[in-house]
Each structure stands twice: as structure tokens, then as C-alpha cells.
Image (cartoon, rainbow, N blue to C red):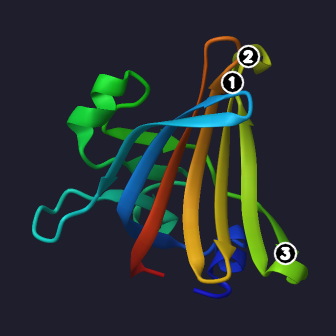
Amino acid sequence: MENYVKQIAAGKEYHARFRRTKIMDIRESTEEIIDDYNYEIGDEDYSEVIFMPSVGRGIETWFTFNKIEKIEKSGFLDYHKNFLIDTLKYTYNKEIDLEMAQTTLWGPNNQSALIYLVSRKKDIFSMNLLITDFGRFHMKVEFSNPVFVNF
């Protein structure tokens, strides 16, 4: 998966299915795991992240979360979200072999923010959503162990 992060930052289309999804509540310098679940072979209930404008999805990035019952109970997310994410800023740290591509979307009056981060450190590839509504909650969704359906 080397160069995947750089290609995603450059606008390459992709469709990734993830075998693991973690949802964490972030408090100052700690993270409390709310949900941590894995895709089970045969259950067809996996998380997906899709950016494919050429097939009519527009320039939005689509997020589908697996195990929706658990996510809905957490009160943070529902089954499916679309965000207008089309360009990411790419950085690379050669010393620790870390690639990152990210963007920040600000809500009304800058009272909320969404940070989308695609990263690869050595052989570990993940996509993360950091969601904050200042003063109310801070959460992170981490997608890992991907299988790329289209790249």
C-alpha cells in the first residue's frame, strides 16, 4: 500500500472496505473506546470509504459504517455519511516512514470541525475521522485493515 496515501491526496478514486472499525471518545489527552468491532467473514457487514466521482458519486467522500446498531446506540453517528472531501494535503516523514493526507472541514461559525486523515506508517494503513462539536464532544472513528475494491 505504499504510495496509496499520496495517490489519494492527488485525487485518485478509491473504494475501500475495512475489516476493523473503532469509535473513540476523546477527552483531553485520553481516548475511551466506545465501540471496537471487526468484520466477520460471511457477515457482509463492513465499513467502507468511497471516493469515486467517475461513477456519479460527485466529489463527496462516502462513509458507510458497519455494525450500525452499535453506532446508533453511541449517539454519534448513523449508518451512512457523505462529506464534501475532494482534496487532501499530503505530507511524508521519511525518518519514521509516515505518510499522511488530511483535510479539515469547518461547520457553521467554526463551532464544529471534521478532520479526515488517511495515513500509512510502515505497513499499517488507516483512515480516520475526527469529529468535534466544541464544548460538547470529541470523537474519532478509525478504519483499519482495508481491502481495496477499486484503486
Q: Which quadrant: the N terminus?
A: bottom right
State if disc 1 and disc 2 touch (CB < 8 Å). yes
**Label 3 neighbour load within 10 Å: few <14, some 14-19, many 20+:** some
Nearer to us of marks 2 and 1 is: 2
- Look at mark 3 in the image and give the residue it sits on: 92
- Look at mark 1 in the image and give the residue it sits on: 107
Residue at x-position 69% and y-position 24%? 107
Compare residues 89 and 93 and report the one nearer the observer: 93
The answer to whether residue 97 is left or right of residue 39 is right
Which amino acid, mark 2?
Answer: Gln
Nearer to us of marks 3 and 2 is: 3
Which amino acid, mark 1?
Answer: Gly
State if disc 2 and disc 3 touch (CB < 8 Å). no
Task: Give residue 130's mark.
Answer: none
Which amino acid, mark 3?
Answer: Tyr
Who comes first in sequence, dot 3 or dot 1? 3
